[in-house]
Amino acid sequence: MKRLLALALILLLLLPAAWAENADVDAYFEDAAFIGDSMMGQIGRYRREQNQQGKEIFPGAKVLYSGAYSLYLGSQRSALDDSPAMVYRGQRLSLPEAVYQLDVSKVFIMLGRCDNPGVPEHLDRLMRYWTRIFDRIREKRPDIEIIAISVPPLAEKYETKTTRQLYFDNFNRALEALCAEMDVVYCDIATPLKTADGYLNQKNAKTDGVHFSEAGVIAFIDAMYDFARSQVAKPSE
């Protein structure tokens, strides 16, 4: 028995402090789903690996993702043929269909990185896609809590003429305003992931310029736990 207690203590100490949570914060994730593109896939795979080692992350939550999944695809009522789709229990589903099938009380959505977010001529169209996503989820699950996650920041090294942190910031500001208008919770994970220069820390980025390194995945999870604490601490309405 003493050996088991010692092992449990060691595993707890191995967890980053931000993940060793109280019951209220753990409960915040229990009936939730995380849905997104390949960046969410990174989070899901890392979480699964850690959970298998006894280091539980987002206890009770479900994670669903599809590579190269755009806001346009997410805004459709049904999955499009020959296009990326959410796959749940062997079915190809649209995002609203997936949320319905997952049967959760809250859903976190992180999309936009595949859409070259914030380019001025695209911004209004992308916000229309977000609007459709919110509306079509509520058609199927009117009481669900929707949390829209900001697009993560870009490492400065990977900026191009059309992929710029300024555009990402514009996208996130527009998304935040839309969330306020549509009674959707906005989750700003971009700000805590930025350096003082306003970019993603280079150590948190993979060399493809799009995805997180393992350090970036951990930083994202830390930011999500900070967000959960802020939500739990809010007074009940």
Image: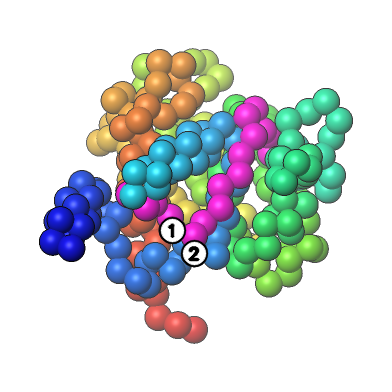
Disc 1 packing (10 Å; few <14; some 14–19; many ≥20): some
> Can I make out residue 84 in this image?
yes
Query: Which secondary structure, mark 2?
Result: helix
Q: Main secondary structure of the magenta part?
A: loop
Determine if the magenta segment contains residue 57: yes
Query: Which secondary structure, mark 1?
Result: loop
Q: Which numbered circle lies on residue 30?
A: 2
Q: Which residues fall within the magenta stretch?
A: 55-72
Q: Are marks 2 and 1 in contact (CB under 8 Å)?
A: yes
- The residue located at (68%, 72%) in the rendering is 143
Image side of residue 217 versus residue 135, left or right: left
> Can I make out residue 191 in this image?
no
In the figure, residue 1 lies in which quadrant?
bottom left
Determine if the magenta segment contains residue 146: no
The image position of residue 83, as x and y in percent, is: 78, 28
Q: Which numbered circle lies on residue 59?
A: 1
Q: Amino acid at mark 1?
A: Pro
